[in-house]
Amino acid sequence: MPDPADQNARAHAEDAGQPQLRRRRDLRRADGELLDARTGTMPAVTPNSPAQPDGTQVTRRTSWAEVAAAADAAQPAAPNRPPVSAQSVTSATIASAPKAADGAAVPTPPAPPVEPPAFRRVRPTVADTIAESPLPDFISSPGLFVKEQKPRPVGGFRGALYSLTGGAWNLGPSAKQRQEDELAKRISRQLQGSYNTAILSLKGGIGKTSTTVGVGLTLAEYRGDAPCAIDANPDSGDLVERALGEGIYQQSSPRTITDLLENIESVDSLTALARYMHHAGRLHLIAGEQDPEVSDSLTAAEYLRIRKLISSYYSVALTDCGTGVTHNAMSGILQSADNLVIAAGYAVSGAKRARSTLHWLASHGYEDLARNAIVVITDKDEVSSRVDKDAIEEHLSGICRELIAVPHDRGVADGDLVTLDVLKPETRRAYREIAAAIVDGYR
């Protein structure tokens, strides 16, 4: 074989004066025996290269990337290989399975499942913990996320301590304040529909109208919707005068229940109805007829028309029925009443008349009204000490749902304007108890 050096010298002599590119191209031999370091190729022998007839292996030129890839492919497989699927090993398993005498393949028992090492502990993820824990109910259990705060005490030593410490020491409300809060909650209970309470008595001058005004003002103070009071007294009732005062009532337009009846067909809104009403704060009132010649002309049918109109705009209505239970409008009042307030006094005659009223109602088809009635005893005239008040209360309490006593108060006994601001705390509390008992009877 000629010396490679001589061949390179001869090639340079033949190509003298040729460009460098041509000399580099011609230096490459087709048989691949020479190696030029500037070409970036090298002979590579792979296991799959074809062999010549004389046994020598044919070399081919390849890049460094291909050589590196071939070297990686020749590396032994890693010991920890991923599990092979059942389909990929089916043919290999069958081919390597032992044969029976008749040539049939003997089934190989399945391999036992691979269990994770005993020392390896699987920890639950945050997602697993959230999924397994019960979800809190944000609607029915708001106390899970907000600390309960004590109500603020009002008045007394507890209220003074709360104010002096800026709220740092909160002993909570007293028992008296909790009772007052409970009364306010009962009075302000939301109602579905319209309800009517009739206030009546068999004897005049025992606090029937003052009770209507005091309870009506109390309902207006605590309820979100304004109540309405109707004067259905056939004997020139003074309901509006007791709520507004005589002077204010005379200065206003004295529209009465008779005027409303004459124009009731044109009243189709609360605005139109307001032209026939009077307002003592949030208490709305319909005045009774003052003319004695027509005051007793209100019939049961006419009252029912008034009641139907009022029910469209007011959820609570009070009806001052006057004295007696046999006048013309009384059957319509009792027919539409949801509960009753029976006015009585501490005089012996007043207690007897209250009991007679309840017996009359029970014997004339109004047993439910009599059983659920509220008896209000007003100490209007400060009866003498010879009268046993406890005996009178015990005598009446067994035939009604609830009995409430209103203490003596000059703001009620004078027979003039009734306002809550001038009443004694005990009187105002009695009116709150009556209002709560009335609303409790609305079912």
Image: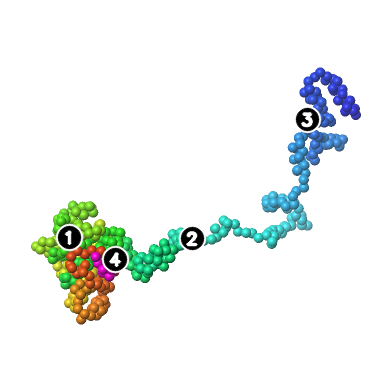
Name the mark on residue 287. Answer: 1
How much space separates mark 1 and mark 4, taking CA atoms?
Answer: 24 Å
The earlier-in-sequence mark between 1 and 2 is 2
Residue to which mark 4 is pinned: 439
Residue 307 position within the rendered picture, expressed as x and y whole percent measured from the top left: 21, 60
Viewer-nearest of discs 3 and 4: 4
Residue 280 position within the rendered picture, expressed as x and y whole percent measured from the top left: 22, 59
Residue 251 position within the rendered picture, expressed as x and y whole percent measured from the top left: 15, 56
How much space separates mark 3 and mark 2, taking CA atoms?
Answer: 74 Å
Asked if the residue at tag 2 contacts the one at tag 3, i.e. Cβ–Cβ closer than 8 Å, the answer is no
Q: Main secondary structure of the magenta part?
A: helix
Residue 317 position within the rendered picture, expressed as x and y whole percent measured from the top left: 24, 62
Queried whether the magenta region covers residue 130, the answer comes back as: no
Residue to which mark 2 is pinned: 136
The earlier-in-sequence mark between 1 and 4 is 1
Q: What residue span does the magenta drawing correspond to?
A: 422-429
In the orientation shown, which residue stands out farthest toward the bottom?
A: 386
